[in-house]
Amino acid sequence: MAVVCALVALVALCLPLTTATTATQNTTATQTARTKADEECEAPEKQTLSPSSADGDTIRAIKNRTGEKRKLIVGVDQNSYRWGYRNPNNGKTAELEGFDIDLVHRIAEDILGDPDAVQFKAIPTDQRIPAIKDGRVDMVVRTMTINCARIADVAFSAPYFKTGQQVLAPKSSPVKGYDGTLADRRICTAAGSTAYAKLEADQKAGELPASTDISTTVPNQLDCLVRLQLGEVDAVVTDGALAASQAAQDPTVQLKGDAFTAEYYGVAMKKDADDLVRRVNQILVDYRKDTANGWQASYDQWLSATLGKDAKKSEPPAPQYLRTS
């Protein structure tokens, strides 16, 4: 356990994080936005634009950057094992690697002709949307679920991965899943995450025990694993794809029960960046068709060890688009 904690601490120091606001402020703002947006939205994963390879103002601005600044600026995670993380064993540079990072390189190659023309910025979970709206990044590729509240603030690509919320707890824990065994238990979630919104809604609806303590939220999802390791919480609720990777990092914890939601990851961009959204959607179409170096190859390399060799349950359905013009 000490080795795992040490590794987590080492990884967290590898790349400066964008300054986070308090978890309480972000959680409150996100809850308010979700309540309003959820009343007006259905099937958020289908509310994207049709694919196109054409350059528009957003893409031209990226291409017009000069010298060392001619890079795609992307918000990513640096702590999610096999998604976006720094592997201390992959050489002196400990470059970022993982499933999300592969997709970023593919986008950069298509837009700028160089897969390495990327400036990575480590973004905490609760800072993904602010980083996009403030123009600190061109996009976020960080296991970001497409949902109704978020599409009120940012534009999403078509889905590139399917997952669902699950419970992570110590193997010795009596917790069995997302059920009554969570009574009197302390649960950790990331501030601004879909996990917290689900727990809060279910508790209000009586579908989660009233005695379950959901007050622990953290800026970065991996911080929940540390809280669990330190005994400060009894369980973590997060995307099953991330939870499986965390379980691979720490053999004393495991997934408890099945996924209790169906969610989709998308690439997030500014609301008015229509040409960039369309371009990313075209890249995703080509990426999924590329059997040698595309989606399937990346899944096999990074995720098959934790999610299983059959990728069909994680592959999103054929995309549907909001409008074609």
Image (cartoon, helix red, strand yellow):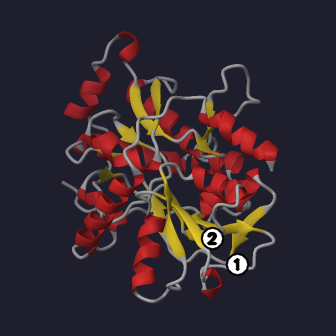
Can you give x and y, in whole percent of width and height, for residue 67 in the image?
Answer: 37, 10
Q: Residues within 10 Å of mark 2 (few under 14, many from 20)?
A: many
- x and y, in percent, of residue 114 in the image: 48, 23
Q: Is residue 90 above or below residue 213?
A: above
* Identity of the residue drawn at 62% across and 80% down: 182
Tell me the residue at 45%/26% (across/down): 119
Tell me which amino acid carries mark 2.
Val
Q: Which amino acid does label 1 sit on?
A: Val
Residue neighbourhood size for the residue with mark 1, other residues' Cα within 10 Å, grouped as few (<14), some (14–19), many (≥20): many
Q: How far apart are marks 2 and 1 (CA)?
A: 9 Å
Q: Please tell me the numbered disc located at residue 167.
A: 2
| Numbered disc 1: secondary structure | loop
Foreground residue, 251 or 232? 232
- In what quadrant of the picture does the C terminus appear? bottom left
How many numbered tags mark residues here? 2
Q: What element carries label 2?
A: strand
Mark earlier in primary sequence (2, 1): 2
Residue 120 vertical placement versus 142 (above, below): above
Instruction: Classify residue 283 as left or right of residue 276.
Output: right
| Side (left or right) of 139 relative to 190 | left
The mark lying in front, picked from 2 and 1, is 1
Task: Pinpoint residue 92: horizontal percent, then vertical percent.
Answer: 71, 19
Residue 310 image position (x, y, % from top left) = 70, 63
The residue under label 1 is 175
Quadrant of the image occupied by residue 3: top right
